[in-house]
Image: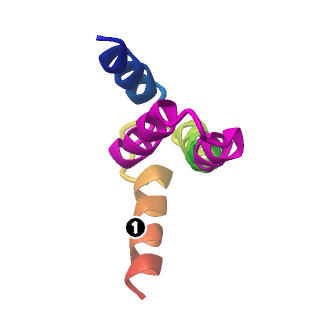
Amino acid sequence: MHKLTFLSRARSLGFSIDDCRNLLALYDDRGRASADVKTIAQDHLSRIEGKLAELEAMRATLTLLVHECADDQCPDCPILSELATGLNAQAE
């Protein structure tokens, strides 16, 4: 039961299945080095920070686009223009 709680908590923190497997192996290994555990956690934290940076950039762009949208009956739409520009840039 304790291992299930351990795995549940690790998954709730977003650790991958492979990370959970490695952390559980380290948990069971009384000769483990805490540096090995920290490396797994630090790598995961770095991935989270990267995702947060991506989300913040997305938020900033969408905030700007929503602010620039006139929200009227005209067909001009900065949101659609940005999406089309982004799609064209990716296709090239």
Residue 56: image quadrant is: top right
Q: Residue at x 47, y 79 (%)?
A: 89
Q: Position of residue 5 (x, y in %)?
A: 36, 14
Which of the image's four quarters has the C terminus? bottom left
Mark 1: secondary structure: helix
* Magenta stretch, residue numbers: 14-43
Residue 38: image quadrant is: top right
Q: Position of residue 52 (x, y in %)?
A: 60, 41
Q: Is residue 91 above or below residue 40?
A: below
Left or right: residue 6 compared with residue 55: left
In the image, 5 versus 89, the foreground residue is 5
The amino acid on which the numbered mark 1 sits, given as a three-letter code, is: Ala
Q: Is residue 89 above or below residue 10?
A: below
Q: Say which residue label 1 marks.
A: 84
Residue at the far right: name it.
Answer: 35
Q: Across the whole image, how many numbered discs are drawn on residues?
A: 1
Label 1 packing within 10 angstroms: few (<14), some (14-19), many (20+): few
Residue at the far front: name it.
Answer: 31
Q: Residue at x 45, y 38 (%)?
A: 15
Q: Main secondary structure of the magenta part?
A: helix
Q: Position of residue 83 (x, y in %)?
A: 42, 61
Q: Residue at x 40, y 38 (%)?
A: 20
Is 47 part of what is drawn in magenta?
no
Is 35 part of what is drawn in magenta?
yes
In the image, 75 versus 32, the foreground residue is 32
Q: Is residue 14 visible?
A: no
Q: Position of residue 13 (x, y in %)?
A: 48, 27
Q: Is residue 18 visible?
A: yes
Q: Is residue 27 above or below residue 4?
A: below
Residue at the far top: name it.
Answer: 1
Q: Residue at x 39, y 46 (%)?
A: 74
Which of the image's four quarters has the N terminus? top left
